Amino acid sequence: MRSGYTASARLLVLLLAALLLLVLTPGEASAHAVLERATPSQDEKLEASPPVVELRFNERLDSTSTPKIVVLNSASDKVADGKVERFDEGKGIRLTLPSLKEDHYTVSYSIISADGHPVSGAYVFTVGNPPPLTDSASLDPHAQVGHDHSHGGSGELTVASFLLYAARIAYYAGLLGLAGLLLWSVQRSASPVVRDVREAAIRFGGKFMLCATLVYVVLSLNNLTQDEPFSEWGRVLTGTTVGKLYAAGLLLALAAPLAASLSKAGRLFWVAVALFVEAWNGHAAAFDPLSYTIALDYVHLAAASLWTGGLILLALVWRKERPEAGRFALLFSKWALLSFLALWVTGVLSTLHMLPSWEYILYTNWGLWLIAKVALSLLVVFVAFFIRLRLRKGNLPQKGLLWSDIGLLSAIVFVVGILTYQNPLPANEALHYHEMGEDMHVTLRISPNAPGDNSIQLKVWLPEEQGAPKSVVLRLQPVDRDDVGFIDVPLAAYEDQELDDFPGFVKAAYEAQGPYLPFAGKWQAQIRVVDSADNELVRETTFRIY
């Protein structure tokens, strides 16, 4: 009896051992799915748009879950909305693509492997030779003429910068005022009082425009060619787009004092060319499509001129003859409303086109000045409502309301004079992340740290007793984007010549070059290092690129 019990016990132990061995033995079905092949592949540069994205894994994927493939362009927008298909007996997934233009594209995938484990990742491929995205540097006139602006990059208000801003404000006031008065000269039914006041204002405005433009161009050229010989002025004026626009502005300013003697057609021609030159010389010229951005800025300037010229004319007529001012105010209020609607529509469309998102308004001085301009514009609407209310009752505008409107106009011109010389896009700065610790030191450098192609350097120092690391992985992932997985950066070891050794530590250096930051946003860099004792050390840092 005891012998039978012992045999049964031994058999049970053997069965349990066999079952345990079966469970613990690694098999193909228990491993997580691994991406074996991707088409297009990581870092691949294609001459034409690929028809599909295909991802093949080393094992069949879970059949009850829905695999996901997301393809994003450099603006982080989805470019494909089709259904993900399965192929190769469930080991592969495929997404049909529309015709893609030249750009960097991010492929992000999320699947469930056969063992029920979620697997995700991302990589980048390129179609054609995409031009660099519009960034802060492309909007800097110093960069456009081939000069460094480091001497003025501190943001401090120097005497030179103050004079430049003052000249810009005077130039802008002269342009809007004279262009607006010339537009109002087209009015056929103007009374003799309005006509006489208008023509006198045009004569003064032409002279003011000439003086303001001369001062503004001279100070601007001096700012662009600091520490350069005077002969550089000629190269800038004749050999750069910025300089040619300054030269065109000077020619228009020389003709401004003659505007009063021009016919209506000649006056409209001067306004059309002057506003076009200013639109081309602004931020709008740096964005694509050029025809759209220039047209928006042109309409914006025309509406601002019409409102400015009309308000100046109303104030001058009001000082000379009140009843005539009341009659002109009725006409002006209608055109002022249309002008304000055009200003708001074109302003909103331009801002949406230039900025990747509304939150960028808070990142720059340009955005803060824009907020100030919007606030002043709302006050103008408030004052205009009460002026219009009095006009409907047959009363003249109150002196306080009229001068409040003129004061707000002056404040807006002041703000615009500064706003148009600010950069709407924040500047990207190279990332230099360094962290020290008892178990590891790391340094990560990314330059220029902007959307698109970047140069990446990663250095790792481990204690001497650990020696060189077994593996080093750098992962980049956008923050607050659940639909995009991490991008594994393919690192290559190199011999680093920098004198940055630490006593008691051994250095390993790696580098990579490519579009591993394909679009703007907040990103996280994760550094995963496995030492010789199989300890995994992880460091993370977050940063933003614009």
Image: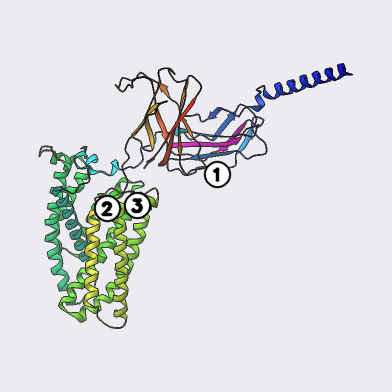
Where is residue 242 shown, x and y percent of the image?
22, 45
Span shown in magenta? 89-112
**Secondary structure of residue under mark 3:** helix
Name the outermost residue toward the bottom.
Answer: 394
For mark 1, give the secondary structure: loop
The image quarter in which residue 170 lies: bottom left
How many marks overall? 3
Name which residue lies at 26% across and 65% down.
306
In which quarter of the view is residue 435 placed? top left
As drawn, the label of residue 521 is none
Q: Residues within 10 Å of mark 1 (few under 14, many from 20)?
A: few
Q: Position of residue 266 (x, y in %)?
A: 19, 61
* Residue at image mark 2: 279
Please, what is the dominant secondary structure of the magenta stretch? Answer: strand
Q: Look at label 1 and name its amino acid.
A: Asp
Q: Nearer the viewer, mark 1 or mark 3?
A: 3
- In primary-sequence order, the first of circles 2 and 3 is 2
Left or right of 311 on screen, residue 436? right
Furthest toward the right, the residue is 1
- Say which quadrant the N terminus sits in: top right
Identify residue for label 3: 361
Name the foreground residue: 85 vs 387: 387
Q: Amino acid at mark 2?
A: Ala
Residue located farthest toward the front when viewing the structure as drawn: 2
Residue marked by disc 1: 81
